[in-house]
Image (cartoon, rainbow, N blue to C red):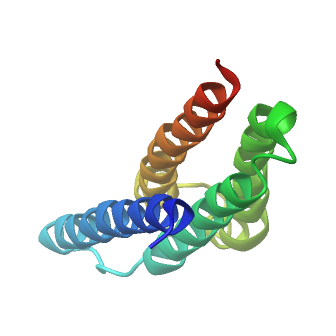
Amino acid sequence: MTRTDGFLLRFTLLLTTLLGAAYATHSWIRAQNGLDPSGDLLPASYILNYLLAAGIVWCLYIFRRKIRQQIGFLFIGGSLLKFLAFFIFLYPTYQADGEMSRTEFASFFIPYLIALLAETYFTAKILRDLEKQDSP
């Protein structure tokens, strides 16, 4: 296994574990409160955040040497991309009744925050590794 494979494998496993556990917990809490465990587009929100977070970190890692000066800007752009996806795919359904409920907000924000934390940690690792390669 190459270093690249190890980094991306660790990231993917961590993201899968974190979002999988969060989804199971989130669904369970919804069910305990008498809500549809899959309501408020919960599966779609977790899948969307997972795919975007994985795609962003994979791209940053694969192209890290070519884009080393722009990694921070591209990372921020990835967050903007996630919000754009939210407004295109989830927001119209959430706003169908004219307001966004707390459960609808949580259905997007919880997986977004978890994925963002994992992305931030691994993007920082990418930047640290690049710094180590540059130092004598």
Residue 46, image x, y percentages:
47, 70
| Residue at position x 57%, y 36% in the image | 129
Quarter of the rendering containing residue 130: top right
In the picture, measured across the screen, residue 22 lies left or right of residue 104, that is: left
Determine whether 51 is above or below 123 in the image.
Answer: below
Number of numbered discs present? 0
The quarter of the displayed image where residue 59 is located = bottom right
Q: Is residue 30 above or below residue 110?
A: below
The reply, left or right, for residue 46 in relation to residue 4 is left
User: Of 67 and 37, which appears nearest the observer?
Assistant: 67
Residue 135, position as x, y percentages in the image: 65, 19
Q: Quadrant of the C terminus?
A: top right
User: Observer-nearest residue: 116 or 133?
Assistant: 133
- Front one among 130 and 121: 130
Residue 41 locus on image (x, y percent)? 51, 76
Q: Residue placed at 12% from the left, 69% from the top?
A: 32
